[in-house]
Amino acid sequence: MGTTASQLAKDSLSEYQELTFLTKQEILLAHRRFTELLDRDERNHPNPRVPMEVILTLPELKSNPFKTRICQVFSTSEDKDGSLTFEDFLDLLSAFSDSATLEIKSHYAFRIFDFDDDGTLDYGDLEKLVNCLTGETEDTRLTSEEMRQLISNILDESDIDKDGTVNLSEFQHVISRSPDFVSSFKIVL
Amino acid sequence: KPQDIDEDDEREKRKAAARKGSKASRKKVSKEQSDDESEEDKGRGKKSGRAVSKKEKEDQNNDKKGNKKGKDEENKDKENKNKTTSSSFSSPPSPADSDEESLSEGEIAALKEQVEEKKKLIATLRNKPWRMKKRLLLLKEAQDFVEKFEGALGKGKGRRLYAFKVMMTKKLIKFNRDFENFKTACIPWERKIKEVESHFGSSVASYFLFLRWMYGLNLVLFGFMFGLVVLPEVLMGLPYGSIPRKTVPRDEQATAMDFSVLFDFGGYCKYSVLFYGFYNNDRSIGVLQFKLPLSYLLTSVGIFGYSLLVVIRTMARNANEGGDGGDEGEFIFSWKMFTSWDYLIGNPETADNKYASITTSFKESIVDEQENQKDENIHLRRFLRVFANFLILCSLGGSGYLIYFVVKRSQDFAKMDPKTLTWFENNEVEFVMSLLGLVCPPLFETIAELEDYHPRIALKWQLARIFALFLGNLYTFLFALFDEVNGKLEAEKSIKNATEWALHQYYANYSSFYNTTNVPPPNVAPADVIRGPCWETAVGREFVKLTVSDVQVTFLTILVGDFLRAFIVRFLNYCWCWDLEAGFPSYGEFDISGNVLGLVFNQGMIWMGAFYAPGLVGLNVLRLLTSMYYQSWAVMACNVPHERVFKASRSNNFYMGMLLLVLFLSLLPVVYSMMTLSPSFDCGPFSGQEKMYDVVIDTIQAMPAFIGNIFTYVSNPGLIMPAILLMILAIYYLNTVSKAYQQANTDLKKKMQMARDDEKNRRNNQDSTNQVMKDLEDLLPNKSLAPTPVAEEKPLDIVIDKTRTTRTKPGTAGKGVEVQKEESLSAPNPRRPVTRGPGPRGGPPGNMRSPQPEPGRGRGQGRR
């Protein structure tokens, strides 16, 4: 779109400001960081796409357990490889920015947690989520009994219609009460 | 001609004509419409009611027009659609032909409405969880629309004005945006804090945010103090050396410039604008007739008022942000699960700590939930807890006594010749207080091991104990100080009598000697005048010294405890027998709670001391400024992330609560001294008055009589009592209302659950009317593979049409959907209509599944 090789066109910059929660400085910074990820010959490409592996080398994402999910959620790639264009990248930063609304944040949080992309958080999703949160090492993992207990507790609390899964509105209901969510669901460059 | 048919369909639908297959669809359409409207409501808040009714009117307009005009218009319409690849509904027929025909009033209104809606769309577009491409297209489209038809609106007389207005709004929007950018660029230390944030998570950053907030508050306080008290005195008051209170006494002059004396805030510092004693008691100074004493009093009180206001406002805002704290504990597990990861963490070590802490918190809460195992020996534990509290009370009492003892001793020292005293004896009080602050918290932590509490509860106890320690120390210090003040007041009285007597003698001698009644004032150099002890300056000096020593201790602790430690651990590790980094000393952690408590108490000292030493506020601003840089450097250079992870936002209000308490407690002694103690007779702005507040009374009496009357009435107990009663009633009322709201909340939740169940049964879980859900499905990458009927039922383009039409003309929403339907019936179209009833859902599955190219989403029918 407006992304030329090295510089953002002025009108697309203002459009991006209109469409995201980012300020001008943040967009410019994002653009600089994004072009740094590109190879030299890719920069001349009109709408370059950075593969997921390269995106994940960003220090801001490196130690995030949900990094691959984040890329997949924000990617518009047709073959679902999690690669991001600059606009996808801006989408990502906008959703994780300081001033994004709770609604946007919770929406994307839900999609990140929805590992199988079926629109609800079911038992499998929650299990994967717990495993992401407790890390890879064996000693921090929960036993299967603990896992079962934990997930049934979670479903008890947040599954309002008792269909065994947490859907988006239930998720948003839970999240909107949380005092910490907005302050912790942030990524800044 | 599908267009034709759909128009007819639309019309018939309006007339409620029964037609094959349309019944189900109509129902759905209307449902969607209402759905749209509800969505709209969400977006617009209060305005919704009005907007909906307007929209209806507009629908009627469009309908009428549609009936009247017929086919040729529709052709045009079609061209229009083809031309703009974008939605057909956003550029509806009315504006197209309105160019040719003169606009009627209703049409203009409708058009205006549309333009307004487009503008609204532009403003709210960023709140939609859609892909950037889609938003970009929508934005462009809306902007084009606005561009194009905005001019057409103002035909006739109002045109110029309208164009001007439009231009101005555009400029204003741009200016606002630039201003926002500018504002964010102006927030100090944003990048620094973000850097810390990304290394240590939001909890450590919360300390720095708190520090920055404190800095802002102090800057304002400094502005008040400096602008209203210090600056007028410096500019318009008498200069140094003109009157006794502004001059260093003769016997101190020899050492007044020594560094050790100045560092102690004696000598020239003591007789400078920093302290209370310097200010003159002239009722008004300078050409402006600035009433300095009054300003001094009011500023001191105003500082408290302003701080109180700001703290409470911040607390209220924090409370709002954090949702209602009422049903805490309702979603313990879900919150742990969904919100415990701190996305800001960008450091692998922090991430590992976080994993560990999350795991423990999961395990803990599971154990908590089970909560079945009893303590084996409950008596022993109880005994230990009581014992631990006893120990802590003892140490609190001990530290209080120690401070009292030291302050008392320092008074004895003060009477001796300062040259015979050692440095330690001079600074004993500050030294002991800092030492206590350094030693006691770890001691408490050790004692708390006995109690064996849950770590979270233990942390609260620990904080409360440190708080009690600081507070106890501060108040003991104050009591000792006031003891001293009373002693000084006694001394002052005798000096005052002596001076008066000497003056009397002088007058008597002079008049008898020269035999005249016209006596000139005694010719004594200001440095030689006998003067009282000026207890206010003494108190102010204590506070300043305390603050400075506090700064020194804090900075030294960081230098030694963090930097030196990190240095040794890092470099001695190469030649040491065990792993220093992982083993015993390791790196220091950033002690958030300790630092915040330190900051809060320091602030308490500032509030208390500002009255006696106006310069203290300026010193504090400097302190905060340096500690911002110093601490952010130290934390990045030599600390490792905390293992016990604090939650940022909730503890924030906890800190604020402490700050409020400290503010209140520091208000008491100041007000006490203002109201009951009599000021020194020869120094400070209130000298010569019986009580400090006499300045206010004087001012009121100097005003016209009716204002004085008003004040008398207001201070009448007969008026104050009812006012207090009224306030109590208001509190009671608000309390009741909040309870009622809580009740209503739970009721609504129950209702929601029931409605949800009901809906589920009725629709058999085949469709969801929720707009939010649809947006979600739109974004799911493998939606075409999703096996649920929900996903098949609702192809994306229609979802989008719907949302778009919401913003333009809901009346045409049904029409748009109908278009789709007719199309898909006539020709095999990959996009499945949403309007079909749940029943006959046939169609070649290949069609349904055919994947749509991403960019084309939502733009389907434009390209048809």
Image (cartoon, grey):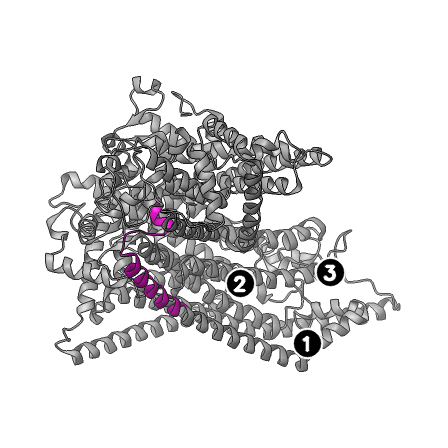
Q: Secondary structure at mark 2?
A: helix
How far is mark 2 from mark 3, CA to CA?
A: 31 Å
Tell me the amino acid under the disc marked 1.
Answer: Ser
Name the residue that disc number 1 marks: B715
Quadrant of residue B68 within the rendered picture:
top right
* Discs 2 and 1 lie in a common subunit: yes
Q: Taking A123 as reference, is A182 left or right?
A: right
Mark 2 is surrounded, within 10 Å at the Cα level, by few (under 14), some (14 to 19) or many (20 or more) other residues, namely some
- Residue B628 spot, x, y in % from top left: 42, 46
| Disc with the residue nearer the chain's start (2 vs 3) | 3
- Magenta stretch holds residue B147: no
Residue B282 numbered tag: 3
Mark 1 is surrounded, within 10 Å at the Cα level, by few (under 14), some (14 to 19) or many (20 or more) other residues, namely few
How far is mark 1 from mark 3, CA to CA?
A: 28 Å
Marked residue chain, label 2: B
Quadrant of residue B1 within the rendered picture:
top left
Marked residue chain, label 1: B
Disc 1 to disc 3: CB gap under 8 Å: no
Q: Taking B539 as reference, is B645 left or right?
A: left
How far is mark 2 from mark 1, CA to CA?
A: 23 Å
